[in-house]
Amino acid sequence: MKTMDNKPMIMGHHMMSAADFANWGVPAIAYFKHEDNGGQGGWSIHAADGTVIGAAPSRDTAFAAIVQHEMEPMSVH
């Protein structure tokens, strides 16, 4: 970004509140991670704030479910 005299504009740092950070990406991002429930593996699907919103039997199914609901999938290892 530049000023009217074509000089670079320096933007100030903005501190996010804890609530802003917790809600960052909530409507657009979901993540999935492998769960080992007593020897039966599966994949849990979480909203960006950590709320469990689904489960799937495979990684591919979890990924597809997130995309189908118009969210950006993120894998957690």
Image: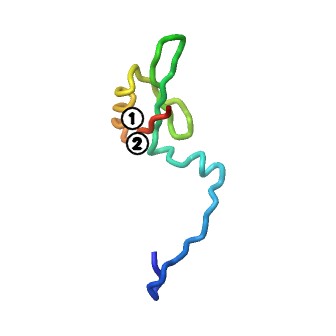
Task: Look at 46% across and 42% down and name the residue there.
Answer: 29
Q: Are marks 2 and 1 in contact (CB under 8 Å)?
A: yes
According to the image, label 1 marks what residue? 66
Query: Percent position (x, y) of residue 41?
Result: 46, 16
Task: Look at 37% across and 31% down and name the residue there.
Answer: 65
Classed neighbour count for the residue bearing mark 1: other residues with Cα under 10 Å, few (<14), some (14–19), many (≥20): many
Query: Percent position (x, y) of residue 45?
Result: 47, 30
Classed neighbour count for the residue bearing mark 2: other residues with Cα under 10 Å, few (<14), some (14–19), many (≥20): some
Query: Percent position (x, y) of residue 46?
Result: 50, 33
Q: Amino acid at mark 1?
A: Ile
Task: Look at 49% across and 79% down and name the residue there.
Answer: 8
Query: Percent position (x, y) of residue 67?
Result: 35, 37
Residue placed furthest toward the top:
39
According to the image, label 2 marks what residue? 72
Element under disc 2: strand
Q: Quadrant of the N terminus?
A: bottom left
Q: Amino acid at mark 2?
A: Glu
